[in-house]
Image (spheres, grey):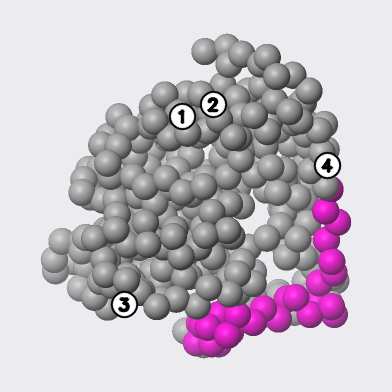
Amino acid sequence: GGLNSGLHNESEMRCPRSPQSGLRGMAEVDVFLIGAPKAGTTWLAHVLDQHPGIVLSDPKEPNIIASHRGTFLRVEEEPDWSRYEGCFSNDGLRLDASVHTFACPMAPQRIRDRLPKARFILCLREPVSRAVSHWNMVRNTREAINNGVDWAGFESAWDDERLRVDSMYGTSMRRWLDHFELDQFIIIDSSRMKTEPLDVLQDIENFLKLGPGQYDLDMSRHSNRARSRRPMTTFGKIIGSVFSVIPGPVKLPIVRYLQKRDLNIYRLPILSRRGIMVPLDDGHYRICGEEMCGELELFESLTGYETSAWKEEIQRRIGNKGITSGL
């Protein structure tokens, strides 16, 4: 990636290999922040990193354990555990915020085999609005085009498992509960991070058995909204290509400096343009709403987590209050 690769596409950054990894076992990773893309995990990860008892991985999304390493990339090779250990430093609960981990079918067993006592912060959002936000982001970054697929319309994108899988909350949770106990999870509705962020953080502190922390709750910093993903201009692509050849050891200190100040040079108008957002409407709900109601009923039956507000919204938007799940 370019100068702001850690901001523009954080998952492309590489964790250094731990110089001691061959001399001792892998250090314990205590907490995984999982859930779904566009469900507030970026903001939550950076806020939790302010707690003195938590150490966030560097980068935020190592993307090493799961086979799902982004929207499109799937890698079935075994994780490089020594490189993974190099993503963490300092004392405290270690936090991995690789968001695509939740939907990966391989991740639960891989984590259980290495880290059976791990705990999980599961961030979720009403699944149709989540999918539309994810789709808008991918359209604006041209990621679908670059991967040779047609996501111009939401219906064609929904037919692609790589978008749909991140909203399949029930199916994913069933796999996780084959390997972990339910009390190893805390489930967070992403809307609460906007309306009652301090309550959310206190719930997480209690779940992790941590004392209270002091937080900067500015919601504009470290957000990962779909509208903030701006398509690159031709000049921006050139600049990105130039900086991509700079050696990592030279580039990394600059990237970290910009990250700490929440600066992304790719947001400059000369390097990127404002993306086109397709507003969420009833048509999106009619495409996938019934399927999502079934997934929510499954998720609720597995976890006891109340999803009726999401189901009612979906049913209202598709104009059918009598939907059955088909389960």
Q: Where is residue 64 in the image (x, y as percent from the top left)?
A: 41, 55
Q: Distance between the residues labelled 3 and 4?
A: 44 Å
Q: How far apart are marks 1 and 4 (CA)?
A: 30 Å
- Asked whether residue 253 is drawn in magenta, I would say yes
- Asked whether residue 287 is drawn in magenta, I would say no
Q: Distance between the residues labelled 2 and 4?
A: 25 Å
Indicate the quadrant where residue 161 lies: top right
Viewed as shown, does residue 24 lie left or right of 87?
A: left
Q: Mark 4 points at which residue?
A: 152
Q: In the image, what residue type sits under mark 3?
A: Pro
Check residue 299 in the rendering and tell me which mark sits there, or answer none: 1
* Rendered residue at 53%/83% (across/down): 260
**Badge 3, how many Cα within 10 Å: few under 14, some, many 20+?**
some
* Rendered residue at 40%/72% (across/down): 49
Is 166 rendered above or below residue 14? above
Viewed as shown, does residue 314 lie left or right of 170?
A: right
**What are the residue bounds of the magenta stretch?**
252-278
Q: The residue tagged with tag 4: helix, strand or loop? A: loop
